C-alpha cells in the first residue's frame, strides 16, 4: 500500500566510435563528467544504473536490455559527444522504457575565450538534435531537459521526470476504495469504471457505510485509548475527550477497512455520514489525514480518479496531499487552497493542531489543521506530455502481463 520507493534511472552515455578509433585518449576525459551527472541524480533521491558508453547499434541494444533487466523506471540519455542517431534509434523504438534526453555539456562557459580544445568535450547537442529529430519522426515519445548541471533546476526537472515515470506506472496498478456514492452532479471526475479500468488500469471497490459500521464495531477500547494518547502527544488538541475518542474509533475502523481492502487510495463522500445512530457516526477527517501521511492517495466526494492520482504521486514523490483551489485572492495574486477537514501532516509545519471545525456544515467533526511548511511545491498538472505518460503506463501493463512489476528485484 502506498509506500514510496526510490526511483531508478538508467543513465546511457552516447559517443562516436570514430573518436575512439582516431582519438582513443579522449574517452577518459569524460569519466568525471559522467560520474558528476550520476551523483547529481543520486543527490536528488534517484538511484542510477549507468550503462557502458555506447557507440554502435549492438551496444545500445545491450544497454537497453540491461536496463529492462535491472528494472529502471526511465532511461536518461547523455550525449558525451556527437553520436549518429541511427545507431541508437531502432533499439529505443523497440522498447517501452520512458526516454528523457538530458541536453547538457561538461562546461557551462563556452564563450569567445574558450580554448578550441574544449570543443571535443562540449558538442553533444549536435547529437541531441539528430536523435530527437529521429525519435519524433518515428513517433517515439520522449522528454528533453536542457541546461547545465551547475544550475540545480536542470537536474531537479530531470529527476522529477523520472519520478513522473514512476507515478504513471503506479497509476496503472491502482486499487481504490470508495465509501459512499460519488457526489451527484460533479462531472469533472465522473468517469465510468470501465474506462478507468480499461484505459488507466484503475480498479475500484465500492463499499457502503455499512461496511465501515462493521469495522468500527470491532475496534477495541484499548486501541482507541492508545491512539488518542498518541494524538495528544503529537498534536496540540483543542477538543473534548468524547469528541476525540468518537473520531478515533471511527478512524480506526476506517484504517482496518483500508488495510483489508489492500488499496492504494480511497475516497469518502461525507454525505454518506448522514446519521448518528450507527457505528460510523462521524466523518473521519482525522484518520483521512493520517492515511495520506502514510502514503495512501485520497480525494473527496467519491472522486476515485483523483484519489488514484494522489496515491500514484505519493508512491513516486513521497509527501503529497489532496486539496482544491477554493478562493482567488485577486488583490494579492495568490490562491487559497483548502478542502473540508483534510490535510497531510508531513508537508505541514511541526505544530499541526487536531481541533474542532468551527465553520462549515459539520462543526462537530474534528480535523487536522496546521500551517504549510515553506519550501518547494510541485503542483500536479498535464505535464509531462501525455504520450510520455501513456508510454509509462503501457510499459507497466506489459510488465504485468509478463508477471512482474517494473522495479522488482
Image (spheres, rainbow, N blue to C red):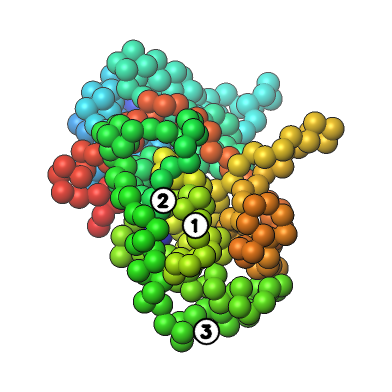
- How many residues crowd around disc 3 within 10 Å: few (fewer than 14), some, or many (20 or more)? some
Q: In this view, does 65 lie above or below 322?
A: above
* Pointer 2 residue: 180
Residue 261 lies, in percent from the top left, at: 31, 60
Q: As drawn, which residue projects farthest toward the top?
A: 137
Q: As drawn, which residue projects farthest toward the right?
A: 331
Rendering quarter of residue 90 = top left
**Left or right, 228 with reference to 304:** right
Disc 3 to disc 2, C-alpha distance: 28 Å
Q: Nearer the viewer, residue 366 or 74?
A: 366
Disc 1 to disc 2, C-alpha distance: 9 Å
Q: Is residue 54 above or below residue 266?
A: above
Task: Please give the label number shown on residue 225.
Answer: 3
Residue 50 lies, in percent from the top left, at: 35, 46
In the rendered structure, are the residues bearing label 3 and label 2 in contact, judged by CB atoms less than 8 Å apart? Answer: no
Q: Which residue is drawn at 72% across and 59% down?
A: 358
Mark 2, secondary structure of its residue: loop
Q: Residue at x 52, y 84 (%)?
A: 225
Residue 296 visible: yes
**Left or right, 142 with reference to 365:** left
Q: Which residue is drawn at 41% across and 50% down?
A: 180
* Pointer 1 residue: 273
Quadrant housing the N terminus: bottom left
**Left or right, 290 with reference to 153:** left
Residue 217 lies, in percent from the top left, at: 39, 74
Amino acid at each position: 500500500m502506498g509506500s514510496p520507493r526510490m526511483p531508478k534511472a538508467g543513465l546511457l552515455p552516447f559517443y562516436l566510435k570514430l573518436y575512439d578509433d582516431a582519438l582513443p585518449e579522449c574517452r577518459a576525459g569524460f569519466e568525471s563528467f559522467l560520474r558528476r551527472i550520476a551523483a547529481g541524480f543520486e543527490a536528488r533521491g534517484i538511484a542510477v544504473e549507468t550503462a557502458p558508453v555506447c557507440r554502435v547499434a549492438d551496444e545500445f541494444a545491450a544497454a537497453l536490455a540491461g536496463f529492462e533487466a535491472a528494472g529502471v523506471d526511465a532511461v536518461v540519455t547523455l550525449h558525451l559527444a556527437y553520436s549518429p542517431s541511427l545507431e541508437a534509434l531502432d533499439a529505443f523504438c523497440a522498447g517501452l522504457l520512458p526516454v528523457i534526453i538530458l541536453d547538457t555539456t561538461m562546461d557551462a562557459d563556452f564563450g569567445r575565450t574558450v580554448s578550441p580544445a574544449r570543443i571535443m568535450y562540449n558538442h553533444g547537442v549536435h547529437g541531441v538534435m539528430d536523435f530527437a529529430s529521429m525519435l519524433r519522426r518515428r513517433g517515439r515519445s520522449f522528454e528533453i531537459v536542457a541546461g547545465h548541471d551547475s544550475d540545480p533546476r536542470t537536474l531537479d526537472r530531470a529527476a522529477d521526470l523520472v519520478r513522473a515515470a514512476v507515478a504513471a506506472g503506479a497509476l496503472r496498478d491502482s486499487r481504490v476504495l470508495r465509501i459512499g456514492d460519488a457526489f451527484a452532479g460533479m462531472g469533472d471526475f465522473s468517469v465510468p469504471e470501465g474506462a478507468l479500468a480499461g484505459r488507466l488500469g484503475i480498479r475500484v471497490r465500492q463499499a457502503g457505510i455499512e461496511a465501515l459500521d462493521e469495522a468500527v464495531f470491532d475496534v477495541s477500547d484499548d486501541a482507541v485509548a492508545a491512539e488518542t494518547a498518541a494524538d495528544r502527544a503529537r498534536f496540540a488538541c483543542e477538543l473534548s475527550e468524547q469528541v476525540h475518542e468518537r473520531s478515533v474509533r471511527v478512524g480506526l475502523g476506517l484504517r482496518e477497512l483500508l488495510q483489508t481492502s489492500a488499496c492504494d487510495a480511497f475516497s469518502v463522500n461525507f454525505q454518506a455520514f448522514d446519521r448518528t445512530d450507527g457505528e460510523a457516526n462521524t466523518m473521519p477527517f482525522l484518520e483521512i489525514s493520517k492515511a495520506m501521511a502514510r502514503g495512501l492517495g485520497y480525494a473527496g466526494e467519491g472522486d476515485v480518479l483523483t484519489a488514484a492520482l494522489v496515491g500514484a504521486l505519493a508512491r513516486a514523490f513521497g509527501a503529497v496531499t489532496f486539496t482544491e483551489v477554493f478562493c482567488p485572492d485577486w488583490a494579492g495574486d495568490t490562491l487559497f487552497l483548502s478542502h473540508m477537514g483534510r490535510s497531510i501532516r508531513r508537508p505541514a509545519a511541526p505544530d499541526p493542531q487536531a481541533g474542532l471545525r468551527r465553520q462549515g456544515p459539520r462543526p462537530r467533526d474534528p480535523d487536522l489543521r496546521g500551517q504549510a511548511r515553506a519550501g518547494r511545491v510541485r503542483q500536479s498538472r498535464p505535464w509531462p506530455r501525455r504520450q510520455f505518460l501513456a508510454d509509462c503506463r503501457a510499459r507497466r501493463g506489459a510488465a504485468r502481463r509478463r508477471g512482474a512489476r517494473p522495479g522488482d528485484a
